[in-house]
Image (cartoon, helix red, strand yellow):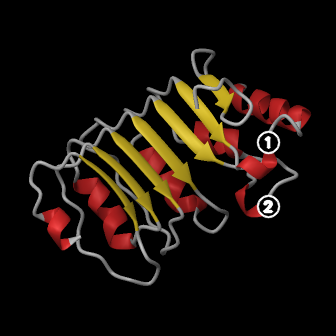
Amino acid sequence: MEEVRKMSGLRRLEVKCAQNVEYPDLPLQLEELSLNYGTENQLRCVERMPRLRSLEVINYLGPNLTFPHSQHNRLMWLYVGFNTDHKPTMLSLIRAYASSVQELRVFCTLPTGDKDFYFPDLGQELAACRLVALRRLVLVRPMEYRCTDNASSCVLQRRTIRSVFPHSVDVVCRSCHSPEF
């Protein structure tokens, strides 16, 4: 990561961190960032990235954080994977970029899946984030909980979530929708 910080022209970075290791700050000039098992410090760096357009945060295990409203308004694509313990952090991250995010992907399961990743109130919680620029919400399912095996649960969850958003927001499921994913 020390070498990465020296790359002034770097625009895209995919990071998978070892757990319980502190890393230096991320380069602030990034336009695209994928952060897997990121640290609290790295997640805080996101706030200071004025050109960030695409962000993926999965497997965050640090303390819950609160993010201020972003002053940059450039983030258009956001993918979050949160569990019940870190839901407040990810919802705060979503709210921070609510004025610019056009596509939001949320890792979640169906009622028959892992209860740490099932959120029956997901629609209301996302609607409370006031995602004014949102055009598409993608529910990303783990492969072992395919929607084709639980079609009625998937349709019900999508319908419930769709009911809290304007008709212009497309709500789809990654594992049971088109093969573009």
On the image, which quarter does residue 53 sit in? top left
In front of the other: label 1 or label 2?
A: 1
Q: Amino acid at mark 2?
A: Lys
Q: Position of residue 163 (x, y in %)?
A: 72, 25
Most extreme residue toward the top is 168
Q: Nearer the viewer, residue 146 or 42?
A: 146
Q: Quadrant of the C terminus?
A: top right
Q: Position of residue 73 (x, y in %)?
A: 29, 36
Q: Position of residue 97 (x, y in %)?
A: 39, 42
Q: Residue at x 79, y 36 (%)?
A: 157
Q: State left or right for residue 43 relative to residue 102.
A: left
Q: Amino acid at mark 1?
A: Arg
Q: Residues within 10 Å of mark 2 (few under 14, many from 20)?
A: few
Q: Nearer the viewer, residue 67 or 29?
A: 29
Tag of residue 146: 1
On the image, which quarter does residue 116 sit in? bottom right
Please indicate, yes or no, whether residue 100 appears anywhere in the rendered image. Answer: yes
Q: Residue at x 89, y 39 (%)?
A: 149
Most extreme residue toward the bottom is 20
Q: State left or right for residue 16 relative to residue 173.
A: left
- Residue labelled with disc 2: 115
The answer to the question of whether label 1 and label 2 lie on touching residues, with beta carbons closer than 8 A, is no
Q: State left or right for residue 131 relative to residue 1.
A: right
Residue 5 drawn above or below residue 178 = below
Task: Quote the CA–CA distance across marks 1 and 2.
Answer: 15 Å
Q: Residues within 10 Å of mark 1 (few under 14, many from 20)?
A: some
Mark 1 lies on a secondary structure that is: loop
Q: Residue at x 79, y 61 (%)?
A: 115
